[in-house]
Image (cartoon, grey):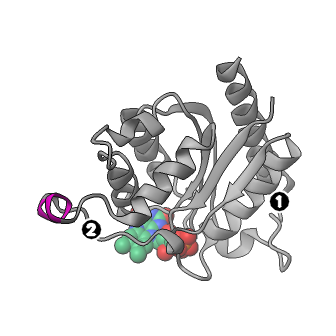
């Protein structure tokens, strides 16, 4: 069975370290045998969630497209920045919208529940966004994801990537590959 993974960075900054890291992660997941759809959240821009807006206009078109992306994949590979010890509002706002009811009136959580998820983070700081991973793990679990225990935080991100976008340290690359392999393995097991 072919494992299909959705992958994105929770930073849309052009020079984002997490954008670089998710590209490395996507490559590792492909090497582990998965089909990976690497998307850019810039292509899914959403307003800040507001219940009145939702009641008036329904689910934004970008959220409906994201629901379909999740429906078409077995899991998520995420790379997230850390803002003040937490994942950024972009991640929360995006997945909060995805969790909302679609045009059929059914909860969007059905597109997320039981899906596997693997977490990466990158930061110029020494801890590499580790606190953001802890918070992301809790949030994704609340949404129904099965988050694998393996994770990789990339610290000193300004020096962590070579010109070609590859990780400079073999140990860090091995950590990303470990996440990718475990994610593909669990996706296979849960689909059997
Ligand atoms: C509001 C804000 C808060 C931040 N707080 C943290 C933090 O708690 N820990 C950390 O390691 N870096 C923190 N940073 C620095 C980010 O790690 C850095 O901007 C990083 O480059 C963002 O990820 P990106 O390169 O993928 O855009 C913060 C940045 C911003 C804008």
- The residue shown at (86%, 54%) is 170
Secondary structure beneath dot 1 equals loop
Residue 9 is a magenta residue: no
Secondary structure beneath dot 2 equals loop
- Helix, strand or loop: magenta stretch: helix
The quadrant in which the N terminus is found is top right
So how many labels did they put on this image? 2
Q: Is 180 rendered above or below residue 147?
A: below
Left or right placement of residue 112 versus residue 27 in this view: left
Please state which of residues 54 and 115 is positioned toward the viewer in this rendering: 54
Residue occupied by mark 1: 169
* x and y, in percent, of residue 37 in the image: 69, 56
Q: Is 18 rendered above or below residue 3?
A: below
- In which image quadrant can residue 55 be found? bottom left
Question: Distance of mark 1 from mark 2, alpha carbons?
Answer: 38 Å
Left or right placement of residue 51 versus residue 79 in this view: left
Residue occupied by mark 2: 48
Left or right placement of residue 1 versus residue 46 in this view: right
Tag on residue 185?
Answer: none
Please state which of residues 16 and 27 is positioned toward the viewer in this rendering: 27
* x and y, in percent, of residue 33 in the image: 85, 40
Could one spot residue 128 in this view of the protein? yes
* Other-residue count near label 2 (Cα within 10 Å), few / some / many at <14 / 14–19 / ≥20: some
* Other-residue count near label 1 (Cα within 10 Å), few / some / many at <14 / 14–19 / ≥20: few
Residue furthest out toward the front: 104
Left or right placement of residue 192 versus residue 16 in this view: right
- The residue shown at (83%, 65%) is 168
Among the two numbered marks 1 and 2 on one chain, the one whose residue lies closer to the N terminus: 2
Residue furthest out toward the left: 52
The quadrant in which the C terminus is found is top right
- The residue shown at (32%, 43%) is 104
Region of the chain picked out in magenta, as a range: 52-56
């Amino acid at each position: 069975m072919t494992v299909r993974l959705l992958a994105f960075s929770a930073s849309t900054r052009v020079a984002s370290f997490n954008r670089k890291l998710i590209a490395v992660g996507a490559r590792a997941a492909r090497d582990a045998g998965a089909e990976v759809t690497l998307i850019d959240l810039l292509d899914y821009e959403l307003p800040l969630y507001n219940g009145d807006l939702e009641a008036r206009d329904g689910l934004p078109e970008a959220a409906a497209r994201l629901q379909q992306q999740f429906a078409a994949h077995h899991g998520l590979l995420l790379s997230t920045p850390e803002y003040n010890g937490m994942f950024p509002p972009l991640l929360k706002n995006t997945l909060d919208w995805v969790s909302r009811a679609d045009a059929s009136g059914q909860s969007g959580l059905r597109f997320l529940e039981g899906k596997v998820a693997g977490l990466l983070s990158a930061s110029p700081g020494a801890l590499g966004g580790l606190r953001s991973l802890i918070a992301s793990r809790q949030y994704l679990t609340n949404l129904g994801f099965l988050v694998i225990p393996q994770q990789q935080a990339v610290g000193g991100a300004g020096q962590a990537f070579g010109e070609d976008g590859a990780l400079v340290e073999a140990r860090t690359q091995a950590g990303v590959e470990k996440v990718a392999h475990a994610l593909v393995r669990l996706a296979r097991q849960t689909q059997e």
